[in-house]
Amino acid sequence: MSEPATTTLNTIIASQAAWAERHGIPFDASFRCRSVQDNLFMPLNPHTAEEFGGGAGDELGTREKPGSMASLRSSSALAVNVFDAWRGHDLAPLASLLDVDPSADRGRFEVTYPTGLRGSPPHLDVVIDRQDGIPLAIESKFTEVYAPAHNDFRPSYFKDPELWSGFERTRVLAMA
């Protein structure tokens, strides 16, 4: 990992730790809070909790062991802190901010989208459904881009060119 990336990662982690300390939120040496709720700005919406509970990422954990969303470095906590407050509200202002058709009528978390490949389908962090049937998918990343690469695409994603039809430039970027 390059020195600037290491510096940026350390700065983010230090900022997150300072936030937790200012709010009296205890965390361990791996920057994990005692509970997922400690790492969220507001209580998790019950529908959101149900969606994450059905996902494959163990974000919520158990009563004995907090899930990955309890980490001060959690991308799923970032997604929830930004988008969960929109539950039950008009999504048109959010859609406008994201520069998409304001026909958005529902947001969901941990939505699976089969790719046609073997194995578990990807779980997208946030999907905003629109009346035109074309969803807006959001994959949240927080510190991953500053840490050693561990989220590379598997070679199977590149075997079938049809998977990338209409997204040729994205394919080139994903292969880089």
Image (tube, rainbow, N blue to C red):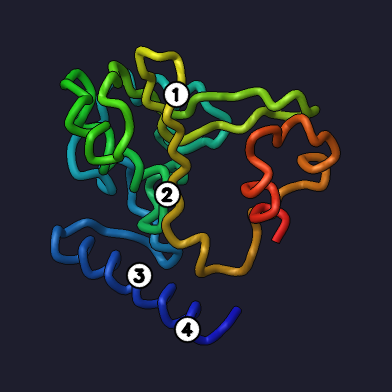
Residue 153 rendering spot, x and y as whole percentages: 71, 49
Tell which tag, 1 or 2, sits nearer the viewer: 1
Is 77 or 87 nearer to us in this picture? Answer: 87
What separation in Å lies between label 4 and label 1 (alpha carbons)?
A: 35 Å
What separation in Å lies between label 1 and label 3 (alpha carbons)?
A: 31 Å
Picture layout, residue 140 above or below residue 90: below
Picture layout, residue 72 above or below residue 93: below
Residue 12 numbered tag:
3
Tell which tag, 4 or 1, sits nearer the viewer: 1
Which residue does the numbered mark 4 point to in the structure image? 4
Tell which tag, 4 or 3, sits nearer the viewer: 4
What residue lies at 52% left-to-right and 86% top-to-bottom? 3
Picture layout, residue 139 above or below residue 121: below
Q: Is residue 152 left or right of residue 94?
A: right
What residue lies at 64% left-to-right and 64% top-to-bottom? 149
Q: How many marks?
A: 4
User: To which quarter of the image does residue 148 belong?
Assistant: bottom right
User: To which quarter of the image does residue 16 belong?
Assistant: bottom left
Picture layout, residue 71 above or below residue 87: below
What separation in Å lies between label 2 and label 3 (alpha carbons)?
A: 13 Å
Which residue does the numbered mark 2 point to in the structure image? 75
Quadrant in which the C terminus appears: bottom right
Three-letter code, disc 4:
Pro
Would you call the spot at circle 2 few (<14 residues within 10 Å), some (14-19), or many (20 or more)? many
Q: Earlier in the sequence, mark 4 or mark 1?
A: 4
Q: Earlier in the sequence, mark 4 or mark 3?
A: 4
Which residue does the numbered mark 1 point to in the structure image? 135
Q: Earlier in the sequence, mark 1 or mark 2?
A: 2
What separation in Å lies between label 4 and label 3 (alpha carbons)?
A: 12 Å
Dots 1, 3 in contact, CB < 8 A:
no
What separation in Å lies between label 2 and label 4 (alpha carbons)?
A: 21 Å
Would you call the spot at circle 3 few (<14 residues within 10 Å), some (14-19), or many (20 or more)? some
